[in-house]
Image (cartoon, rainbow, N blue to C red):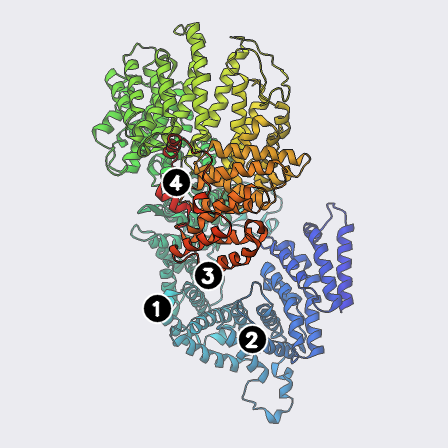
Amino acid sequence: MSNSSKKSIEEVVNDVVNEEDDERDTCHIVMQRYFLQEWKTVKSLLDDIVSAGRVSDFSSVRKIRSIMDKYQEQSQLLEPYLEYIVPPLMFIIRTKTAELGVASDEILDVMKPISIIIYSVVTVCGYKAVIKFFPHQASDLELAVGLLEKCHNTGSGTSLREESTGEMEAKCVVLLWLSILVLIPFDLSSIDTSMADGNDVDQEMLPPLVQRILGFSKDYLSSSGPMRTIAGLLLSRLLTRPDMSKAFCSFSDWIHEVLSSQTNDVTDNFRLLGAGEALAAIFKTGSPKLLLEVVPTIWSDTSTLMKSNTAVRSPLLRKYLVKLTQRIALTCLPGRSPSWCYVGRTSTLGEHIPLGIPKSDQGNNASMIYPNFSDQDESCPQEEDMDVPEIVEEILELLLSELKDTDTVVRWSAAKGIGRITSHLTCALADEVLASVLELFSPGEGDGSWHGGCLALAELARRGLLLPINFSKVVPVVVKALHYDIRRGPHSVGSHVRDAAAYVCWAFGRAYYHTDMKSVLEQLAPHLLTVACYDREVNCRRAGAAAFQENVGRQGNFPHGIDIVNTADYFALSSRVNSYLHVAVCIAEYDNYLYPFVDELLHNKICHWDKGLRELATNALSTLVKYKPEYFAGVILEKLIPCTLSSDLCMRHGATLAAGEVILALHKCAYLLSTDKQKQVAGIVPAIEKARLYRGKGGEIMRYAVSRFIECMSLAHIQLTEKIKRSLLNSLNENLRHPNPQIQHAAVEALKRFICAYLVGMGNKSIYDILPKYLEQLGDANVAARRGSALALGVLPFDFLANQWKVVLLKLCSSCEIENNPEDRDAESRVNAVKALVSVCETLTQENEHSSVFSIEDTVSLFLFIKNEVMQSLFKALDDYSVDNRGDVGSWVREAAIIGLEKCSYILCLRDSSGFPSQLQRNESIPERQKEDNIPDDGLQSYFDASLATRLAGGLVKQAVEKMDKIRELAAKVLQRILYNKTVFVPLIAFREKLQDIIPEEAESEWAEPAFSYPRFVQLLQLSCYSKYVTSGLVISIGGLQDSLKKASLSALLDYLQMKEAKERELSLASDILWVLQNYKRCDRVTVPTLKTIEILFSKKVFLSMEAQTPVFCAGILDSVTVELKGSKDFSKLYSGISILGYVASLSDPVNKLAFAHLLTFLSHRYPKIRNATAEQVYLVLLQNGSLVAEINLEKALEIISETCWEGDLDEAKHKKLELCDMADLEAGQLPQATSEPNKAIVQKRETLDENASYSSLVESAGF
């Protein structure tokens, strides 16, 4: 068997590989080709298992299972291989069990990994497809029972494991094997070897083999795993055998006890689930003759249990009970196929086409093909009266009530039950059932009732139980369900109802003939497409489109059906924006869809509870204006204008936005509104303000809507009176002062359009009023006013700025700086000021050449101001590292400054390239290392000189190596654009060729990825004009808190230092680090990570082998550390400084004595943790450099350090410190001081500007 199985696998693989892809390929071969690539791997692993007779490597099991799991939704691709997967594996289990015996423990080790493979196939393909390939000889029954007993009695090793060890899978596989073995056509007592001696066994008793199976199955019915379902399947097949009537009676008594007992025990709850599932399976397969005897008892227990609290708490139990009750009803009803059912299609069309009818006439003889259609439409055919058992009526009432259940699985099961039972009733009774279902759609019912009713209607339609004569009752209900959306607090319910209603329409398309559906489709099609395009939920949009597609494909003769189906496909509807703004617009051009779409948007969507959906709906409404401008100008605006004053917030917000968008769309269509209509439109905003609709709940979104409405009105050039203009301008100014940034930005956009439309070029006095007002508000105590005024200045046109441009630029430059008063600091104000500064420069420089206001002197003055003042303000903004409770808010300012520097550089370079005041060579070659600082000397006066170019490139490089990914990426991309700009050439950049090597002209580069960017930018350390910029940014990354960034930046720096000329590079880096410490003295934002960087580099033996330069560097470091640690309360700074002092003191240079003396001073620090850390460093220093203490005192010094409790009494610590000083020949008065006292005014100024210089930040940085 093993060899034959192996051979079969090889033959299949060879056949599939060698088969040519032609039209004669069978479906079997085609499906194999889809799976062929992985089948080779699976086949190889299976061959190894079969040849070894067991799984030798468990990794092969994991690999096979991972491959199988990928086919969960494409199981049909796996089914052709089941014949070659399952039998060989089951053969191993069968033969090994027979060979080793069920008593052997080894059989479980063989079986478990194989069972994992088989069970993974079962989970993908289902048990029905798999068990067909299980061995089913009669002799295997006892073998399988013994194997199940072995698995059942073997406990699991542990419940805490990462992956299955095969115990559960082994039980499931054996149970499935038994479920097919119990179907053997022999009396089970004849197979049971324990009954070979008839004298020893009571003939009235069940065969021992059956008793064992029943015992195991009952136990597994209490399981919480998949064994419960499989055990129910096994019992349904075993107990419904003709020779198992006694076993069935015994099981019925046990079931009665289980259903009657109601406890809160967890095991009993699972047993109830298993009992219900098993009974449902038994009533599905058992004969009515067998089941009718127990129906009264089972129904009594089931109905009682259904009303219990246990069922109320368990949706799964209710589902099983509903399934059981419907099958009880089917058992009590006669098996019949009623003649009154609707039959929309026949299996063979040719059988119903009369011979001799020309093909052209066949399409017009539907009545001949479907002779019963006309009768069905008129009335139900007459049938004999039917006596429905009382139990069936009770079950129908139960199922109808369960259609209102709170859980979908229960409603779905009840709907299917109603469909199955109705198919066994007469037409008159079916009408009664339909009437009961339609009662579920009454207005007082909840969403669960509507959902269950839709599911029931779909089941009736699918089974042909809903006759066309009832369409007039059903279709209006379905239309209402397609738009069901009930508001509940801040959300709504109804998506499941709309989805189920689309399912009803889908069922209509599959069940009915197109002549019966013609009028129905005319009603349903617009509503289905409305749902497909405008529903909020993606599943409902796709369900509506699927129902429409089904009807188009099966009903035919639908105008533009194929085009619409291609437009509204599955993927196009996945995006709500695409559905609203593109798919719906394409469909609306066809007849009969525009007005339903407009009505849906107008009545349901612009007043929707979801603010984002309302805004999207207003845009969608405007996209439809082009099809019927006069309809929108007349009817729609007449409806929208009164709604802007509605008491409902959602309605007035949506109506205000919609009115503005419609007006703008009409203007784009060149449709001119009448004078009366323009007056009505112009009065909307004053009416809203008069009604005080800005106040209370919803005032913010109304302000946003009004700003957008003014913007649309300005773009459409609606005629306004002077009074209304003044009123609208005041409204925009109020919105500019609002603290909500969205309202401010909307007001700024509206102001920009409003000024251009109504104030520019009209000699209006408002020009002279607006600018001073905004300039004054730049210094307002209200931060919102400062933010809004800066934004407003940035959008003012040239006419407003020309006369006072210097005042505006000076005011904006001062607003870009960090405020002196900490309470007045606001990062958003500085961001807006930076953006406005750049925007004003662009406005002034773009239009001054065409204006008579500016003279040549004014133009020169403007560009010099941009060079000397604006660029300097932007460079200062690059050093904005403000921090508040939101984090590094200064990064917003730096981001705006980076973009502003790029734009202003282009402005200056464009002016230079125009030939005024000097000519620059476009392809100027910059010689490297011309000067000490390598800045090229152009020798010409220009707006964009070499110094400015170097500061620009250096500032961007510094940002490109700092800690924030977003800023690094932006800085690198801006520098890349500057280097390779084809429109504006930026000259005089030092080492342009080197920069271009580091920053290639690739469109997609991962600059935000530290491993990509740092190795490139660190190369700039060898260029003196950029090295200080790179170092000042690099130390912040290396000494920062982010481990991944620290690792990448440090690795790049160490790799750079290990290249050729390593000593020169170390020396240059040492000089730059000293410069950083001196330049940012007492600025903790920079000095703390710099000290951490020095500590890390010392630990990597960097700077310790620079020969004569090492003492000089260490002396400089010692001076800086002395200044930084003096009076500091920052724990991280103190720890790093102490560690650095320890490294310096460990050297053999003369500077070590000073470092050691300074280190000893911290032994009497007021913080115990600092004293303890210092003691550790002193101990290590003495071990490495014993020359600091006389040899005779060294051992005693180490003893003092190790035995003293430095975290204890401070006086004792001071005493021990003095002892150590005596041993080191140091006196307290000789302890080192800083070589130069820093200017107190400068230090005080830096501390004032440093937003971290507060007690709270010190405590946070210390970790408390």
Residue at image mark 4 = 886
Nearer the observer, 97 or 28: 97
**Alpha-carbon span between mark 4 and mark 1:** 50 Å
Residue at image mark 1 = 309
Where is residue 1172 shown, x and y percent of the image? Answer: 46, 54
Q: Give the amino acid at mark 2.
A: Gly
Residue in the image at 42% along x and 57% along y: 1207
**Alpha-carbon span between mark 1 and mark 3:** 28 Å
CA neighbours of label 1 inside 10 A, class few (<14), some (14 to 19), many (20+): few
| Mark number, residue 155 | 2
Q: Earlier in the sequence, mark 1 or mark 3?
A: 1
Element carrying mark 2 = loop
Mark 4 or 1, which is nearer the eye?
A: 4
**Alpha-carbon span between mark 3 and mark 4:** 62 Å
Mark 4 or 2, which is nearer the eye?
A: 4
Where is residue 696 shown, x and y percent of the image? Answer: 24, 37
Q: Earlier in the sequence, mark 2 or mark 3?
A: 2
Mark 2 or 3, which is nearer the eye?
A: 2
| Mark number, residue 420 | 3
Mark 1 or 2, which is nearer the eye?
A: 2
Q: Earlier in the sequence, mark 4 or mark 2?
A: 2
Residue contact at pointers 1 and 3, CB within 8 angstroms: no
